[in-house]
Every structure is written in C-alpha cells, then in structure tokens.
Image (spheres, rainbow, N blue to C red):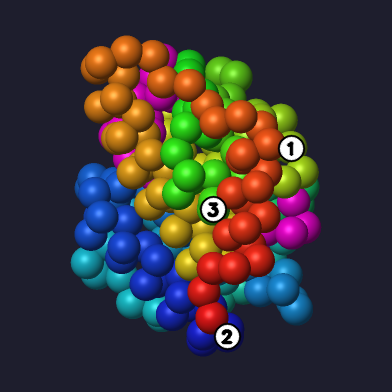
Amino acid sequence: MLEKLREEVCAGNRELPANGLVVGTGGNVSGRDPDSGIVVIKPSGVSFDQLEPSSMVAVDSEGRVLEGDLKPSVDLGIHLYIYRHRPDVFGVVHTHSPYATSFAVRGEDLPAALTPLTHLIGSGVPCTRWATPAADDTGAAIIEAVGDSGLAAVVARHGVFTMGRSASEALKVALHVEEAALTIRMAQLSGPVTALPDEEIKRCFAWYRESYGQ
C-alpha cells in the first residue's frame, strides 16, 4: 500500500537523527496520500536506524491501522488533527530540535529575521499556548498558532511541528526552522533580534515561490 509514500516517509524519518533534530526514538514524520487520505507514519518507539519502508504504519483519517504490524507513533492524533484542519497539508514533521525548542521552553516566537526562513514559510514561527499532552489539545494549539496558512510552530514546553505539501517539504521546513533558531540565538548574544518589515517578508516569500528551483 502506497509504496512511494512509505519510502518518502521512511527516508524523512531517517533524516531526523542524521541532522540532529531528535535523540533516541523521539520525533516523527508522516505523509498523507492526496487521493485516498491515508496517512503513513513512523511506528512508535522503533529506532530510526531500524526503520524500513515496510515498517511504516498506514492509517485512515480516524487512526485505524490499515496496514502494518507495528503500533503507530503516539503523536499520530496530533498529525491527524492537523490534517483534518489543514486540507492543504500533506506532510507533518515533529522534532525536539534543541535550538528551536529553546524558544518553546521560553514561550517565545522565532522572529522572521532571516531571508531563508521567510523565503520558505513567509513568516516567523509562533509559539503555541500551553497544551495538555493530548492529541486534540496539542493539535488545536498548533492550528490556533499557525492559522490556515502557517507552516511551523513551536509547541510550548515541548518541541517543533512543521507542515508542507509533502513529507519532504515538511522536513525541509523543520531543517530551516532549526537553522534559523540557532542563528537567532547566536545573534541574541550580542543584543535583540528584530523581524524583517512585513512588506519584505511578503516579497521574499513571493519571490521564492515564483523563482526557486527548476
């Protein structure tokens, strides 16, 4: 079932520890098939180096396992909440990447201070309200923070959730969020960091969408 999506989601999950975005078995990547609505996600508690495309778990929109011998990630409910409320999203990534999560610990937004981040997501990264560790409340906090177009949020006292038009794009956003968080934290050692003007943020985002890539 959904062989290409399984391969993409598996590859995305393997990239998390390779890029220092997670430790142990924490964090996860999922993807949603645009035709069937089936979601493919990392299994719970399995080491990243043991993951194979066949390890991924396929579920329906209610979280019922359709294919796979392993239990899906405990964060599945959050992913499904995001997919239900954001029909434009087909990939979700959750990490505990340290620099971005440092903003979550302090309840701070990442300002839209860097062009690479504004190119990719067209905004800064908001920090959510405190959410109880449950699927619906955490999912609701994320959607409240990002609205109908945002692609990333840091969840207060927890970690990072990013979104995209595919699992691969959501992973790209997660990597850029962590890079921006690291750079901003370093810059803050010398003083305050401010966001770009709104008109420049919009211009950067539009330019990237129109011009970047083949």
Quarter of the picture containing the C terminus is bottom right
> Which stretch did the figure color magenta?
86-106
Q: Which mark is residue 85?
A: none
Q: Amino acid at mark 2?
A: Met
Horizontal side, residue 100 vs residue 47: left or right:
right
* One can see residue 134 in this view: no
Q: Position of residue 195 (x, y in %)?
A: 52, 27
Q: CA distance from mark 3 to mark 1?
A: 17 Å
Q: Amino acid at mark 3?
A: Leu
Dot 2 or dot 3, earlier in sequence: 2
Q: Position of residue 30 (x, y in %)?
A: 52, 61
Q: Secondary structure at mark 2?
A: loop
Work out whether residue 53 or residue 95 is closer to the camera in this orientation and state it: 95
For disc 2, the marked residue is 1
The image quadrant of residue 144 is top right
Quarter of the picture containing the N terminus is bottom right
The image quadrant of residue 100 is top left
Q: Secondary structure at mark 1?
A: loop
Q: Which mark is residue 147?
A: 1
